[in-house]
Image: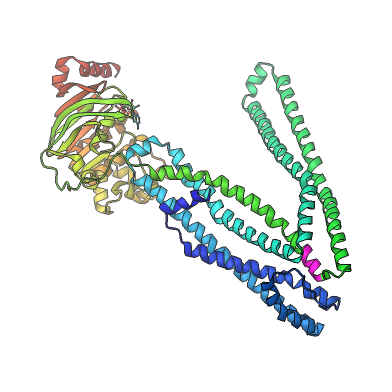
Amino acid sequence: MFKEYLKLNRYVRIRWILFVGGMFFMVGSILTSGISLSTIVPLIDRIFSHKKILFPENLPSFLKNILEPLKSFLNNAPPILLLKYLIFFIITVVLLKNLFFYIQNILLRIFGERILTDLREKIYSKIVLSSVDFLSKKRTGELTTRIIYDVGVLRRAITDGFPKFFFKLSEAIVYLSIVVIIDWKMAILSFMIFPILLYPIFRITKKLRKLRENVQKEYGNLGNTINETIYGHKIIKAYNQEKVILEKFKRENENIFRTIVSILKRTIAIPPFTEIIATIGASGIIYYGATKIIEGEITPGFFALFLTGLFSLISPLKTIGSSYTEIKQASSALPRIFSILEEESKVKDEGKKVLSEFRDRIEFVNVSFSYGEREILKNISFTVKKGEKIGIVGPTGVGKTTLIGLLLRFYDPTEGEIRIDGENIKNFTLHSLREKIGLVTQEPILFCDTVNRNICFGENEDKEKIEKVAKICGISDFIESLPEKYETIIGERGFNLSGGQKQLITVARAIYKNPPILILDEATSSLDSNSERMLQLAIEKAMEGRTVFIIAHRLSTLRNVDKIIVLKEGSIVEEGTHSQLIDKKGLYYNLWKLQHQST
Ligand SMILES: Nc1ncnc2c1ncn2[C@@H]1O[C@H](COP(=O)(O)OP(=O)(O)OP(=O)(O)O)[C@@H](O)[C@H]1O
Ligand SMILES: [Mg+2]
């Protein structure tokens, strides 16, 4: 499990210095708390009961050597002076202890938060930089879950679980050493008594957890029934089902009552039960300890220290268990995160040439493509000369969007190649290739940002140029009417635009980029005739002087293009101009007829 966490090292820089520093101060904090606890001994033995302090006989010799001068000082100083010293000492130690505690906590938390921040960035940049196939395979929901939820679970484990685990573990070791050093026989005795006595409580809490889960579920059922009743009340009445649903509610409601009563019976029993058990256990230990005090084998001070150490052990032991579980549970998020970080992009940016200018032609040469096993495009070949407009037509799902995605290298062909000016596009850098191509997607995609920045999208924000482009697209009037004009925030969480307005803005975005090659994937959603005409005009403007691929669903868009290719079942079945294809009376003609009969 810890190995899994260490694997994080491969993806993010782990600041070990913070960790080591944190651990150092943690040890300091725990030791000082052990020391402050030990002041009980002189306090009780010398100051309150005027006894000489007897150190336990069976101390390890190194401890004896350290404690010898301390012992003679403690036993010779007058009690009132000792009290003053002791109070000063306690305050200093507690100050130090808390200072150390603060420093260790801060260091370890920063250590954890740094890892998580870097990890979030790693996953995010993996998503941004990876190829389209990676993104379409994962569901968006899943990726968001990885970044937000899984990293969140890890966050709790790394910044909270780990520090707590180590802190409580060391604390437990200190307290354990105290009780063992004072009297190991008495320590073993106590460790045997308490688990036996506490076993029933352990059973009860386990049962309680189960009951609490049940009551959650039962409340859920009840909520469902109420919702259904309100939502479906007409049907319930129309079908005379009031009685039946009422019975159901009663049953569920009574179930909750019964479960809650069994929870109450147990919860209320725990504190008195615990007290009884603790008293029995403590009495046993006190009896044993007191006989030792009477026999002079141990001083009251050391016995008090023993008891305090013993009871101080309870809380760390409890926390160690719970934080260990937390760390273990969170570790299951790690493989999921790693699998994302390790996944390789299929489309590799390995081309070295820079496509500085598009001069002559684009060729698809025997291009085939499949998504996994499913073959979508078969042996597609065609050439587009610079400046030509080419229309792509075919039934829905035939692979039109896929085809133009290949030109942008969202995916690479499974067979064949695509060439620009005779060079396989794989040989160009992705950046220089995509720089030459403008894309208007089938579904208009806007970002939650201003109109301005949605149009210039990443290019230099030239206000004048944006307004000019907006005019060309015929949207300047409409943008002027927005509450903040060009500074209005649009997109999913911004100002709501109509479908047509969204599309016009995406066309404006493509014109602003001013690429030599333009891809227009016509939207399938129908627009009213006015927006339709505006869009048509904008698209015609956008096409001027460029090499254009138009995927058209409304065939009237294609009347003036230089060439149309018609796809069917993944292959080109017809090729030619609009009038040639009409004369041919094939698939294109049929589609055309269909559209013109319905309008
Ligand atoms: N990421 C993907 N993974 C697997 N299959 C896909 C993926 N994207 C699309 N497909 C499938 O590939 C086929 C072609 O899809 P594509 O989007 O290219 O069709 P289209 O011709 O553009 O359709 P439309 O006219 O409806 O826009 C469809 O059957 C689709 O289900
Ligand atoms: Mg499509």
Q: From the viewer's perspective, tell me whether residue 356 is left or right of residue 267.
A: left
Closer to the camera in the image, 297 or 277: 297
Q: From the viewer's perspective, tell me whether residue 512 is left or right of residue 11.
A: left
Is 129 covered by the magenta stretch?
no
Q: Quadrant of residue 505?
A: top left
Is 304 covered by the magenta stretch?
yes
Closer to the camera in the image, 385 or 262: 262
* Above/below status of 61 relative to 179: below
**Residue 481 visible in this rendered orientation of the protein:** no
Residue furthest to the left in view is 360
The image shows residue 554 at horizontal and vertical percentages of 26, 25
Q: Residue at x 79, y 44 (%)?
A: 200
Closer to the camera in the image, 572 or 102: 102
Ligand 1 visible in quadrant? top left
The image shows residue 272 at horizontal and vertical percentages of 84, 49
Q: Main secondary structure of the magenta part?
A: helix
* Stretch of the chain drawn in magenta: 301-307
